[in-house]
Image (spheres, grey):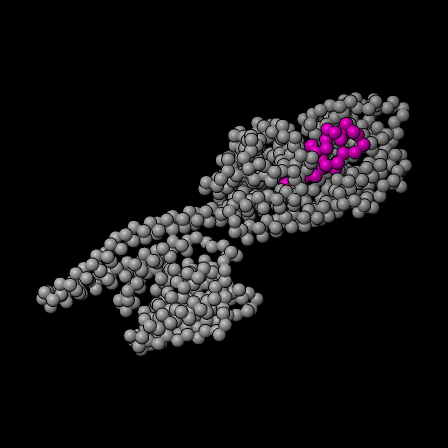
């Protein structure tokens, strides 16, 4: 249909019409109809552009500056007073990023948001002008709520550009995905373009659209590279986590602040395990005092509730939420919630915020809050990267909580074992003392006691002695286990010569093994082999391994002890203890290092023991970041290998 006679609605803003708010601003004085110049003459007059949009594309690394150059060049070539560039966001919104040619329109529109559904509705009402879409004034009136109009005045001419006229051009990438819109408003001649003029405008707009698409692709690639670096640093920090959650979160917060270029970062996670914070949420703003004099605005009850519920909704949709005076996070924030957050932003002197949920699986554990005080814009790449960081932090939170539970359980076990050991010590000492006294009394009274009764009393006292020795072993093992619950500071430990420790253990075991004809053979280096550990722990480790080998060997057997130091990429020490004894079944090997485990094998069960020796060995090796291995052939012996870091 010819636009000279078209009277159906349109929608546009600026001085014609462009999606925005409902504010009405004064329009420049409308020219006299006699002075109106056809757009074609204006287009021809600027066929040699003052600004080359392709050159402008590479002249600046700032996307906003590049888009402004393109918009200004497009308006100049096409013969329009003003032009605009708007981009679709992943939040189902269209954001105006550049407005040129009209200061009032720029103030009203830049950063303005229109729901994508409204834009698609406008396009459905538009006339198809090839790459252009034109929504006439009358059709646009139904979208008036989303259109900025500077003035309702119009020229008394049948082809005059009317207040709500909208001329736009969709921008698509190579895959056909809709990226944004280009807008033209207020022809210099004051008239709607005719068919010839449209063709010329379409060529210039098509070139501008291609330039914008290239600029967007370059910008998104640069954004992806920039944010990938921040995300990788977060992943490395989370993966290498060895500290408590507050320290980890503070490190991540600093990475996010630098990587995203934001003014504030708050990681807010419910404090479920008694971490020392003054608030029910863990707030780790870098500049916040340890004990803030007043509650930060983001921790005020209503704000914290709104942000927490927003994070829940974000997690369900696996997206982040952006909020500013212009952006209302449709589908995530209610109007009252949006108004409240905008009020908090204004009171804090900030412009916009982004919330990314922290969680894992179906559980939301908290959220990351980023705040900008001098910028409104957030890219889709930033929104996506924030969601990824929320996932990484979610795993870290669960890991930290599991570690916290382990630490609490470890402290409980240590306290329990120390209590048990000390509770056993006193009655054990009394029993041993009474046994000694009874033995001395028996020796004094032996001449007057019937030989048979004396022998029976001797056997009873010997049984008391064996039982006391076993209880003493249990107490010693419990105290050793309790001590191993505490992780040492490896750097503060003085290196110990493991060669000397093993040599002493071989000497002691040889004396114990001799009555059964068992030989204990040691193959040791002729120089010190240093290990950074507590000497008492190494003595217990070696004596347990060598003592077990002797205990479970057959008479006239052999126990072989070998110590080897290696200097590969990382120095290490390997202690190997082998025997030709009863061996260990595959089933028992699976539980061998459990506390209080005793084998069901009658041969093994007949040997005295507490069931804690190998558990202590494993705890000791792991305490010093080593490992313990076992191979065994039932009936033919076992080999235990303990590997520790060398010095």
Query: Would you identify the image quadrant in which residue 201 lies?
Result: top right
Tell me if residue 110 comes above or below residue 428 in the rendering: above
Task: Tell me: 145 left or right of 201.
Answer: left
Residue range (magenta): 85-114
Residue beneath the point at 54% across and 66% down: 571
Residue beneath the point at 35% across and 52% down: 417
Q: Quick check: can you spot residue 293?
A: yes
Q: Nearer the viewer, residue 477 or 453?
A: 453
Q: Position of residue 66 (x, y in %)?
A: 78, 42
Tell me if residue 535 comes above or below residue 383 in the rendering: below
Tell me if residue 474 comes above or below residue 35 in the rendering: below
Instruction: Confirm whether the magenta stretch covers residue 91.
Output: yes
Q: Position of residue 428 (x, y in %)?
A: 26, 55
Instruction: Confirm whether the magenta stretch covers residue 416.
Output: no
Residue beneath the point at 62% across and 32% down: 328
Q: Position of residue 350 (x, y in %)?
A: 65, 32
Query: Would you identify the image quadrant in which residue 340 lies?
Result: top right
Residue beneath the point at 30% across and 63% down: 609
How many numbered callouts? 0
Q: Nearer the viewer, residue 225 or 509?
A: 509
Tell me if residue 7 comes above or below residue 474 in the rendering: above
């Amino acid at each position: 249909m010819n636009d000279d006679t078209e009277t159906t609605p349109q929608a546009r803003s600026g001085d014609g019409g462009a999606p925005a708010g409902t504010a009405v601003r004064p329009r420049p004085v409308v020219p006299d109809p006699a002075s109106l110049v056809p757009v074609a003459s204006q287009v021809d007059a600027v066929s040699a552009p003052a600004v080359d949009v392709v050159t402008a594309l590479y002249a600046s690394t700032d996307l906003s500056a590049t888009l402004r150059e393109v918009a200004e060049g497009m308006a100049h070539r096409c013969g329009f007073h003003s032009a605009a560039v708007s981009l679709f966001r992943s939040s189902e919104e269209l954001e105006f990023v550049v407005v040129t040619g009209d200061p009032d329109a720029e103030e009203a529109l830049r950063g303005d948001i229109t729901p994508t559904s409204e834009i698609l509705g406008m396009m459905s009402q538009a006339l198809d002008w090839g790459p252009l879409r034109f929504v006439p004034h009358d059709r646009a009136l139904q979208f008036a709520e989303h259109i900025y109009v500077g003035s309702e005045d119009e020229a008394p001419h049948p082809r005059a550009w009317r207040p709500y006229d909208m001329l736009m051009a969709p921008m698509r990438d190579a895959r056909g995905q809709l990226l944004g819109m280009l807008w033209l408003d207020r022809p210099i001649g004051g008239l709607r373009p005719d068919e010839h003029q449209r063709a010329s405008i379409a060529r210039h707009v098509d070139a501008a659209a291609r330039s914008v698409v290239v600029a967007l692709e370059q910008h998104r690639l640069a954004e992806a590279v920039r944010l990938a670096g921040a995300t990788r640093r977060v992943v490395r920090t989370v993966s290498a986590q060895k500290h408590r959650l507050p320290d980890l979160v503070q490190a991540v917060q600093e990475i996010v602040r630098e990587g995203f270029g934001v003014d504030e970062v708050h990681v807010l996670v419910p404090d479920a395990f008694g971490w020392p914070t003054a608030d029910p949420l863990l707030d780790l703003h870098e500049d916040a005092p340890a004990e803030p004099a007043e509650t930060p605005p983001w921790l005020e009850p209503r704000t914290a509730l709104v942000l927490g519920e927003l994070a829940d909704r974000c997690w369900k949709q696996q997206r982040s939420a952006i909020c500013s005076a212009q952006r209302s996070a449709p589908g995530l924030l209610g109007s009252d919630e949006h108004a409240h957050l905008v009020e908090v932003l204004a009171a804090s002197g900030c412009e916009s915020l982004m919330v990314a949920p922290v969680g894992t699986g179906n559980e939301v554990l908290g959220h990351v809050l980023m705040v900008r005080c001098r910028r409104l814009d957030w890219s889709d790449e930033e929104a996506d990267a924030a969601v990824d960081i929320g996932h990484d932090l979610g795993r870290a939170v669960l890991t930290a909580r599991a570690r916290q539970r382990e630490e609490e359980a470890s402290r409980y076990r240590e306290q329990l074992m120390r209590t048990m050991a000390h509770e056993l010590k006193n009655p054990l000492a009394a029993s041993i003392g009474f046994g000694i006294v009874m033995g001395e009394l028996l020796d004094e009274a032996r001449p007057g006691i019937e030989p048979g009764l004396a022998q029976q009393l001797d056997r009873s006292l010997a049984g008391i002695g064996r039982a006391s020795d076993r209880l003493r072993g249990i107490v010693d093992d419990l105290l050793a286990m309790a001590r191993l619950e505490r992780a040492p500071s490896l750097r503060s430990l003085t290196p110990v010569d493991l060669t000397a420790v093993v040599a002493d253990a071989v000497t002691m075991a040889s004396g114990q093994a001799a009555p059964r004809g068992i030989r204990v053979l040691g193959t040791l280096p002729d120089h010190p082999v240093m290990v950074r550990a507590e000497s008492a722990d190494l003595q217990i480790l070696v004596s347990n391994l060598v003592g077990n080998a002797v205990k479970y060997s057959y008479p006239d057997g052999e126990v072989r002890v070998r110590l080897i130091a290696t200097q590969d990429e990382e120095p290490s020490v390997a202690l190997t203890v082998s025997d030709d004894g009863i061996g260990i079944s595959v089933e028992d090997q699976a539980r061998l290092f459990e506390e209080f485990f005793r084998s069901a094998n009658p041969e093994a069960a007949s040997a005295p023991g507490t069931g804690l020796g190998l558990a202590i060995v494993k705890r000791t090796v792991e305490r010093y970041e080593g490992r313990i291995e076992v191979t065994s052939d039932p009936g033919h012996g076992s080999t235990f290998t303990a590997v520790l870091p060398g010095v």
